[in-house]
Amino acid sequence: MDERSSRVERALELPVVVAALLTIPVIAIEQSSLGATWKTIGDILNWATWLVFVAEIVVMLSVVPDRWRWVRENPLAVVLTILTPPVLPLALQSLRALRLLRVLRLLRVAPVARRLFSLDGLRYSALLALLTLVGGAAAFQAAERKEQALSFADSLWWAIVTMTTVGYGDFAPKTQLGRVVAGIVMLVGIGFIALVTGTVAERFIRPDMASVEQEVESIERVEDEIASEVAAIRERLQRLETLLTARR
């Protein structure tokens, strides 16, 4: 992308992340029995969050120099916008929990890829795990509505024991969509636990890694000095050769 497109994309970061996070109260409102007023508020928020995703795609496609390349590089934005419109049938409304995946845009704000096992990486991963926990609970409750009479507290407990792989077995998915949600929650939970373990290990080996990096830097400095001296010697030899040739 050119500079203008990158600037517009950065400006859209915050609205998209906020819209994704609003998915949690939207699902919670619709699964509650708060009354018609709150249901109306939930419907408005549902449409508003989806329209933010639509607006992002329309704006980006109008400013990027290569539209098809942007679509190929941002499949998550396009697919989630297509799959989660508010006009979906009630049985598929639980797919809206997938909008939380748009929070992955936060990973572009910090170089998490390079600092995955650092405290910064752990913070962002903890945020993703928390969102998966709450969003997974809401999605599980919606997916299992016809098979099990679960409260949000029951679904949240299910998400906790599933994410931590404890698996008390109080509630088990009975629908295909519920099993898909369970698989996603388990994978995120296992990944987060592995990341915590790696971060703790990294804190112990960091002093040794620092000394190794210092030694490597020292070796690279010596190599640069040797290369400079060799270049100077080569230049002197060339000059000497030129003088000898001139005297002949």
Image (tube, helix red, strand yellow):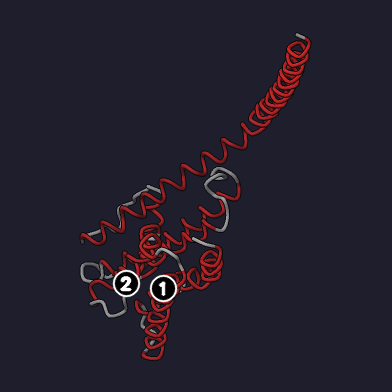
Residue tagged 2: 84
| Up/down of 119 relative to 203, above or below | below
Residue tagged 1: 53
Q: Secondary structure at mark 2?
A: loop
**Circle nearer the viewer, 1 or 2:** 1
In-image side of 111 versus 224 (left or right): left
In the image shown, does 144 or 60 lie closer to the viewer? 60
The answer to whether the residue labelled 1 contacts the one labelled 2, judged by CB atoms less than 8 Å apart, is: yes
Separation of marks 1 and 2 at Cα, in angstroms: 10 Å
Q: Secondary structure at mark 1?
A: helix
| Up/down of 39 relative to 133, above or below | below
Q: How many marks?
A: 2
Residue 213 tag number? none
Residue at 53% of width from left, 70% of height from top? 8
Residue at 52% of width from left, 60% of height from top? 106
Residue at 64% of width from left, 34% of height from top? 206
In the image shown, does 172 or 15 lie closer to the viewer? 15
Which amino acid, mark 2? Thr
Q: Quadrant of the C terminus?
A: top right
Mark 2: few/some/many CA within 10 Å (<14, 14-19, 20+): some
Residue 44 position in % (x across, y down): 40, 85
Residue 219 position in % (x across, y down): 69, 23
Residue furthest to the bottom in view is 37
Residue 6 position in % (x across, y down): 53, 64
